[in-house]
Image (cartoon, grey):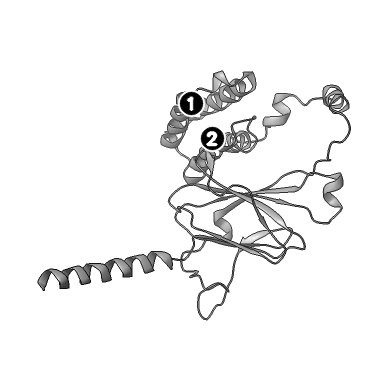
Amino acid sequence: MFKSCKTIQTLALVSILIGTVAHADPTFHLKNNSSNAIQIDIVQGLSSVTGLKRIAKGGEFAFQVDITQPTRLTLYYCPTASFCKEYLPEKYTVDFKVGQTMYIKFDGTTLVPQKGNMLTGRTTAGYSLKNNTAADNMWITHGAREKLRTGTKESVAEELKNRPEKSSQEQRSSSTMGPKERLLLLFTNPPQFLDNFAFELQHMLNQSYNKTTLMAIKKKINQENLTQIGPTQKEWKKNVITIIDQEIKTIH
């Protein structure tokens, strides 16, 4: 009889725990208030945690994201039906502060935290806003508008070949910028294949800017075997390390 009661109590406790997990609020929720469908991808570490997801006009997307990890949202949007016949989709990237829920909305031009109901302190979907991200804790980048390339592979290749290239100095940095701004510029404009790696470094820099952080970034870069990827990645690494070494000497 005692064993039966103990078993029943255990089963009841398991049921309660399962019910609690099943009804836990998502940590990410996006409302698409724009005039067209959007596509999004959520990245943590070096990989996507959602894959590319389509959200219809007026639609919503909820997901359980580990908020203890650096999180980046990438959003693609065509403002009009004809826009993406001439241009690549508008691209927005958002880096979030660690430790907060990400209940946000997109209106076609901006990404902002959801306001919800001031009386209940919850979103329209019923999620608590107590620990939600703030605008100051969202680092947003809006990519430059880029024309869609059409024609044969040969014609596109010829166009790219004959296009005047900016120097590395013009692309990556400016003499008027301070060391932190130059590093952020490098991290937000990484070479091919290094987007997610650069995102991690950018997050480290945004969390705190001091000698300890710079040394940790340098160590992480040196541990990553970038030289096997290509000369562009090798040059990027060299530029970052040079700035860090110069800055470490001046910080006491």
User: x, y (%) of residue 212?
Assistant: 41, 35
Nearer to us in this view, 207 or 123: 123
Residue at position x 51%, y 43% in the image: 203
Which quarter of the rendered picture does the N terminus lie within?
bottom left
Residue at position x 87%, y 36% in the image: 150
The kind of residue tagged 2 is Phe
* Number of callouts: 2
Determine whether, in the image, residue 87 is placed left or right of residue 238: right
User: x, y (%) of residue 21?
Assistant: 39, 64
The kind of residue tagged 1 is Glu
Disc 2 marks which residue? 197
Residue 165 is tagged as none
Residue at the extreme bottom of the image, as rendered: 119
Determine whether, in the image, residue 238 is placed left or right of residue 10: right
User: x, y (%) of residue 58?
Assistant: 70, 67
Residue at the extreme left of the image, as rendered: 2
Determine whether, in the image, residue 156 is placed left or right of residue 69: right
Q: CA distance from mark 1 to mark 2?
A: 9 Å
Nearer to us in this view, 105 or 188: 105
Which quarter of the rendered picture does the C terminus lie within?
top left
Element type where label 1 sits in the image? loop
Residue at position x 50%, y 63% in the image: 132
In the picture shown, does residue 39 fall above or below 210? below
10 Å crowding of disc 2: few (<14), some (14-19), many (20+): some
- Does the CB distance between marks 1 and 2 fall below 8 Å? yes
Disc 1 marks which residue? 224
Q: Quadrant of residue 22?
A: bottom left
Residue at position x 69%, y 58% in the image: 110
Determine whether, in the image, residue 191 is placed left or right of residue 200: right
Element type where label 2 sits in the image? helix
In the picture shown, does residue 85 fall above or below 1? above
